[in-house]
Amino acid sequence: MGRVNKNKLHIAVLMGGWSHEHGISIKSGKGVFDNLDDSKYSRRAVIITPEKKVKLLPPEIKPDDDSLQKAEVLTFLSAFDNLKKWNIDAAVLALHGKGGEDGIIQGFLETLEIPYTHSEVLSSAISMHKVITRQIYESNGIKIPSGIVFQENDDIERMIFDAGFSFPLIVKPPQLGSSFGIEIVGNIEELKISLSDLWNIDKQILVEKYINGKEFTCVIINKKFGEKAEAMPVTEIVPVNSEFFDYEAKYTAGATEEITPARIDDTLAKEIQSISIKCHEILMCEGLSRTDFILSDEGELFILETNTIPGMTETSFVPQVARAAGMTFGDLLDLLINYAIEKSNTEN
């Protein structure tokens, strides 16, 4: 299959995947697909199934319930052979979690020499793991909440006592996004139950001191390959019904008030932006990243995590922040695609 329109770039939007975030990724992929300028791009939806197969839709067919139901299920190799014959120019990644945000799909695309958006293999793998990123943040003088990493059969009570921790604490699976599995526990029994439930997900579970305060996030973008990353306006996060920015708050319309630019003074805004750029750089992120913060009631600023493929659903920050920065979501996608192609052309 050659090009039908030589003036349009052939862009595949990868979504779905086999992580807990499959459904959220589909929503992100739909958001990307709908906001790609069809005067510039021939768009194609690539849905990776939980069974690690691929539903490859024809060009310009939107990934709605009807088209997904009818789509033929292909192997990875067959689907991407089809995309190569279609003369794909680049892949836009709308994948979240294991298999999509951790370097696996990035390595596959590298092997096939298909340019792709967002971060490379190593950066993706490192940034996905909260325990490893904590070590990198600490070694670079970036303040993080105090935490303990538990493994199965650890003496939980002794380790909590030795660390001088008091409840409440917050439990975090290191390699899950979208706040899956994150829970606030109020006593040792609740902690033991939470950890017991999570051992089938990961061999290590992170437990941090719970910090009461205001949450913020900052998107970083590389507008052009070879140029320094830039910070977008800071967003203030105000969950309406939740104690913190959990899964429901992230993906339920109206469950969170998101204020861009944040209601903070310029000094704090610049500090958040500066730290976000530093995180983007030390984790070797590219294209786009989003770093989350909490400002404690005592006025201390802590970093929570950096996301290499932030959500792009109708309730996500990225489209909102783009508008606050004076660009459309489509403009932002143009920058990501151009960056990926420029980088590939430079390296090949």
Image: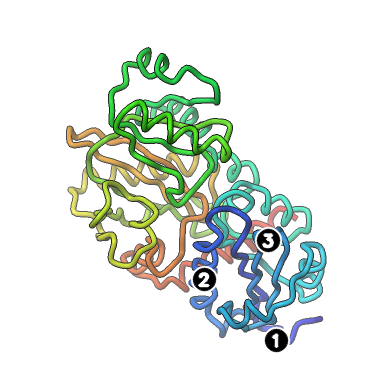
Rendered image: mark on residue 5 = 1
Residue at position x 74%, y 76% in the image:
72
Q: Which residue is mark 2?
A: 32
Residue 95 occupies quadrant: bottom right
Q: Nearer the viewer, mark 2 or mark 1?
A: 2
Q: Nearer the viewer, residue 11 or 146?
A: 146
Residue at position x 47%, y 17% in the image:
155
The answer to whether any part of residue 143 appears in the image is no
Q: Give the amino acid type for the residue marked by disc 1 in the picture.
A: Asn
Q: Are marks 3 and 2 in contact (CB under 8 Å)?
A: no
Q: Position of residue 203 (x, y in %)?
A: 58, 32
**For residue 236, side relative to residue 181 (left or right):** left
Work out how far the residue at label 3 is from the one at label 2, CA to CA, in angstroms: 17 Å
N-terminal of the pair, mark 3 or mark 1, is: 1
Secondary structure beneath dot 3 equals loop
Secondary structure beneath dot 1 equals loop
Work out how far the residue at label 2 is from the one at label 1, CA to CA, in angstroms: 21 Å
**For residue 272, side relative to residue 71 (left or right):** left
Rendered image: mark on residue 237 = none
Residue 188 occupies quadrant: top left
Residue 208 versus residue 84 in the image, above or below: above
Q: Which residue is mark 3?
A: 115
